[in-house]
Image (spheres, rainbow, N blue to C red):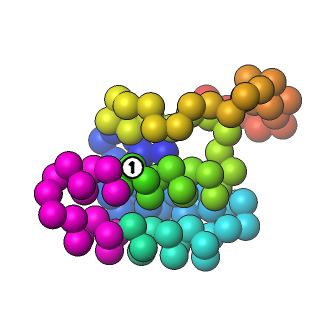
Amino acid sequence: MTRKGLSEKQTIEGILKLAREQGVEEKVKGLILKFQDAVKGAKNEFERKHIAALGLAEIHKTIGCVGGLVVDGVEILPPEPGYDEIINQYKSVHKLD
């Protein structure tokens, strides 16, 4: 979900846009606030990174993403089984890059 080079604000805006399109914007806003607060309460960088990754994983699933989730080069969630078939079904409907 997070793209290299984007600010936190830009990343959140992109996530909320996807959430709005899927009808789960309010739920995702709540998750963002929940995990931002949890990150603030972390005792060290190790905890911050892991809490943030948990938050991204929960948001990823809430939005309905089926592809894998990679954070800082580490796969957090593998792609859903049948992911390629699902994506191929929608290629004619949406331009996917």
- Give yes or no for residue 37 being in the magenta stretch: yes
Q: For the magenta stretch, what is the residue range?
A: 36-51
Task: Tell me residue 35's x, y (percent).
Answer: 39, 67
Task: Tell me residue 21's x, y (percent).
Answer: 70, 60
Q: Is residue 80 left or right of residue 1?
A: right
Query: Which amino acid, mark 1?
Result: Ala
Quadrant where the image shows the C terminus: top right
Q: Which residue is mark 1?
A: 53
Q: Quadrant of residue 12?
A: bottom left
Q: Residue at x 28, y 65 (%)?
A: 39
Q: Residue at x 48, y 45 (%)?
A: 1
- Most prominent secondary structure in the magenta stretch? helix
| Residue placed most toward the observer, 78 or 29 | 78
Label 1 CA crowd tier, 10 Å (few <14, some 14–19, many 20+):
many
Q: Is residue 78 left or right of residue 81?
A: left
Image vertical order of residue 82 relative to residue 39, above or below: above
Q: Is residue 7 at all visible to an observer of this figure?
A: yes
Q: Residue at x 42, y 73 (%)?
A: 34
Image vertical order of residue 63 relative to residue 25, above or below: above
- Give yes or no for residue 91 being in the magenta stretch: no
Task: Tell me residue 44's x, y (percent).
Answer: 14, 57
